[in-house]
Image (cartoon, coloured by chain):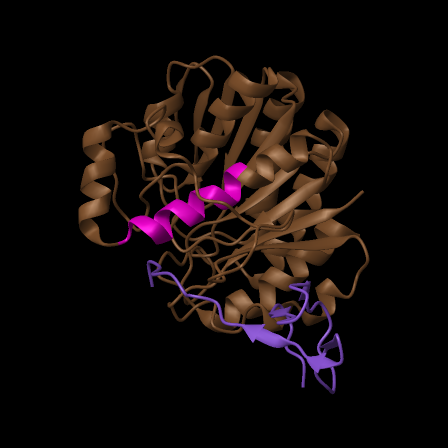
Amino acid sequence: MCTGIFFHYQQGERLKDFPQALDQVLDKDDVFLYDAFYPSKPKSSFDLEPIPIETLHKIHSSEMVDRVKATGNYEGALYSAAGTLSAAIKVWSGEILNAFVFTGYGDHHAGSNFFGGGCYFNGAAIAIHELQETFGAKRFAIIDTDAHHGDGTWELFENNPTVLYICFCSGSSQEKNQNINVHVPFKVKDSVYTALAKESFEKLVKVFTPEIIFWNWGYDGTIWEYGDIGLTLESHLQMTRDIKKLANEVCSGRLIVVLCGGSRRDYATFLIPRIIRILAD
Amino acid sequence: MSQLGKRYRCTECGTEILCTKAGEGTPVCCDKEMEVQEPRPLPSSD
């Protein structure tokens, strides 16, 4: 089975080394690059297409979509969410086993009628709605290890029993239906973090048995990052191995990793190719 | 020099290829060097 990489070119600093940094990853026969945005280019099966406006409106209010348009970041936000949607459809249909989605804007601070914190459209929520409506998928899990609380994802799914949302952040522990906030200490060692993960999402996911897992992966909790909680670079790789193993056990490996917070270019260039390689091995 | 992740297009027959391994030389189709398709970068949060 294959790993899909969903990529669109961006103006920002943190992904400046991509796609060149994927050199050792795209070597593999079972890794595909789905890209976006070449002018005057006929469609191909490897294109990343924008999300239709009517699909956006199933999750976000039309007023909110208009407000996003007014920011000037609409197209970047659209293609960020489009990667997650496209990845979900291709994973669900069996075209690929798992995926890594490059985003210019995250999604977990985007709710039904609000956005902020560098997030505009909730790609995971849009993808889940599409899988439910079009493909009849029934149970989903979102694991959120960005250092900040995913208030948008929380709001969208707090009354939805089909979605298990587990958010790892420094906020207080709380629980509502299938929404679970796991308190992470302000400073934490890798071993403590990993143990916390095993205690919480591994157990919860095994009980819930989702059919597909979305992982909102942020590296902003890494040491010297803006959300520094003391995590090392290695912790992200270990987490990838653990979550991939979990996906193999509960949902035949169906896993979508969505890039969220983190600003350092050197960290992105180090971590992302290694994470994709773990997904593909 | 071909470039990783870039798309090339044949101006004669319209064939497009995606470079997944960079190397020396430029892809050729219909006896002509293929043209690299320039991406349009989108804004991002950083």
Residue A177 position by quadrant: top left
Q: Nearer the viewer, residue A187 or A65?
A: A65
Nearer the observer, B14 or A219: B14
Number of marks drawn: 0
Identify the magenta region.
Answer: A73-85
Left or right, residue A202 beside residue A97: left
Does A55 appear above or below B27? above
Residue A153 % position (x, y): 38, 31
Q: Is residue A75 magenta?
A: yes
Chain A takes which shade in the image?
brown
The residue positioned 44% from the left and 44% from the top of the image is: A50
Q: Main secondary structure of the magenta part?
A: helix
User: Who's the residue at 70% across and 54% down the image?
Assistant: A32
* Residue A63 percent location from the top left of the image: 18, 31
Q: Position of residue A214 (x, y in %)?
A: 56, 35
In the rendered image of the structure, the colour used to display chain B is purple
Determine if residue B27 is in view: yes
Q: Is residue A231 above or below residue A265?
A: above
